[in-house]
Image: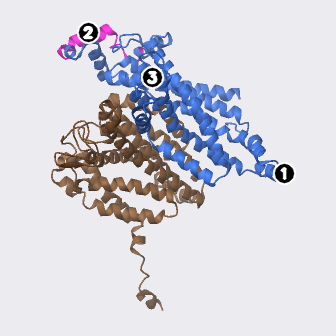
Amino acid sequence: MSTAVATAAPPRTPLLQRLSQPRPLILLLLLMWLPLMAQVMAGNYLGPLRNIIMLPGIPAAVILYVLAFRAWRESWVATLGLTLVFFWILVALSAPFLPLLDPNKPIAPFTLPFTEKRDVFFWLGTDLKGRDMLARTLWGCQRVLVWGVTATAVAYVVGTLFGLLAGYLSGWWDEIISFVANVFLSFPVMVLFIVILNYLGPSGFNIVIAVTFASAPAIMRIVRGLTLDIKTRDYVFAAQTRGESPLYIMLVELLPNARGPIIVDACLRLGYTTVAITTLTFLGLGLQPPDPDWGLMIKEAAKTAMLFKFSYMLIIPALSVSSLILGFNLMADGLREMSLRD
Amino acid sequence: MLGLILRRLVQMALIMVVASFILFVIFDTPAFKKKIAIAELGGFAVSALSEEDYQNWLEQKGLNVPFFQRYANWIGNITTGDFGKSFEKNTAVGPLLLDRLKNTGILAFWVFALMIPISLVLGVLAGMKEGSAQDRTISFISVFTTSIPEIATAIILTVIFALGLGWLPAKSAMTQGFDWRQLVLPVLTLVTYDFGYVARMTRASMAEVMTSQYIRTAVLKGIPYRQVIMKHALRNALIAPFTVIVLQLNWLLSGVVVVEVFFQYDGFGKLLLEAALFGDVYVVQAATLVAVIVAVLSQIISDIGYTLLNPRIRFS
């Protein structure tokens, strides 16, 4: 009897379902994310390799999109947000392979959209230095995406760590961590950004530090609240009775069970960080020229494009950044709606 | 009750002391002292100075006294109203800051005057019938407008109303005295960005109240629906939005920076950014401190107001 069971072929699970396990998902995410990060943060050291490494990212992004779409299909808000976000991720990954002009090469200044000049047809026109707007817009999403996600991720690691410590250990840990968080939360965010970036100097890495200081206290508060709630559950007592270390309980018992609200908040915070990076770059405290970036495009055009005829130079990057942020916010909204329904 | 208020005040005072201390640690670093020197003497002069001359200059300016003594002096000067002098504008920081704060205050007043009624009405309308078409439309509009960052809203409004239709001026520098037409676009930008958030908070609070037992009782008693909303639901549903609205003051101090820079409106945010980019240290110090004071005060008001409005809440 037992042999018969062993020899019978196990029912085949569909490929998409097998890919939806945590491990393949993480692998796909890394496959999509690492090339982008390498391209933006260390592109100059990679030489000719910098474009080739993007190739495996494109199918990974498509598969991830299909998987997420399947999982969230019950909420049209979430899938709409997902589509917007993955549109820009795919553009960021495939920008080197698209038939685009060099985004940093001046060709013909002040060419209006849908016109031909010097035998080149400009879909979105050119900016005040004569660089192609279409190429700059599509290339520009790389830096916004990579720095935005990196900064949010670092803020999350720091905020979650302190939130778990404050919530689980309580007592003096809680008092001290909460007080420090309250001090940082009493600064208006933009003022904190200006003070930190003015002190450290404008660059992508310093934006990560500034965002961490501004966001981690709020994240810490959320995680602390969730921890205080989950801490009283039976499975945590069981783990304590087994004699597990506090670190094990925090990371294995508490964190996975708090993930729902954390993921929703992360989507919202990705939107905030994208706003912050674009705004800081516009104010001259963020990413530096010459590489294309949406905030930079607005900053450069804001002085010269104050005529209705040339307003496309401002409108195009403004709409691009809005669509990305709308994507993050709709995703957060849809996920929250779904989590409330269950 | 009094004990609670007192404890909050002590806590907030402690936060102020620590926040100012952190700021001072940043402003006391050698790099920042060098910035002061460059602002005062010019870059060439500083690079030409010998180490000894530089030390003499620091001593002359009173910058090399021990850390804690300088901190005490700084706090002492501030309490007597002496914020130092702006390098860029060559005036005392105190009156300059006061003037700019007044401008930002005018902006903030109109933002709140428009934002509060719009967001409360929309939030109540949406939360009244949860899940209805009316609710879904208002919710989607509020997510949509909050998703467009201030800088994009500012651009879109400028392109439509100033560059396209020509109804309003594109810049708000107010060079020829006060002109209300120049105030319209900055106010609209901030309201468009912010009303959605408050409306969503109001909606959530209203929706929660509408599911409660006493509303069901009131409806079953046969009281007209209108009266149930006006008399029973609104009173309890508007407590939570109150705290959110007061806390928007903190947000406004952030949002105002980019709007004032874009429209060239001479307010607090533009002053802070210009000072930061120029290295005008005393202005940055003073402006940051004022921002923290306003933020902390708004937190106290929202805490105390929430307790006063909601007799069920008692912080233990």
Asked whether A195 or A82 is in front, the reply is: A82
Q: Position of residue B220 (x, y in %)?
A: 81, 53
Q: Give the label on residue B56, or none.
A: 2
Q: Give the label on residue B268, or none.
A: 3
Residue at x 68%, y 48% (from the top left corner): B128
Amino acid type of disc 1? Lys
* Mark 3 / mark 1, whichever is N-terminal: 1
Is residue B21 rendered to the left or right of residue A88?
right
Q: Which chain is brown?
A: A
Q: Position of residue B138 (x, y in %)?
A: 58, 47
Is residue B245 rendered to the left or right of residue A267?
right
Tell me the subunit letter for badge 2. Answer: B
* A98 shown above or below B100: below
Among the 4 quarters of the image, the one containing residue A53: bottom left
Amino acid type of disc 3? Phe
Residue at x 29%, y 60% (from the top left corner): A58
Q: Which chain is blue?
A: B
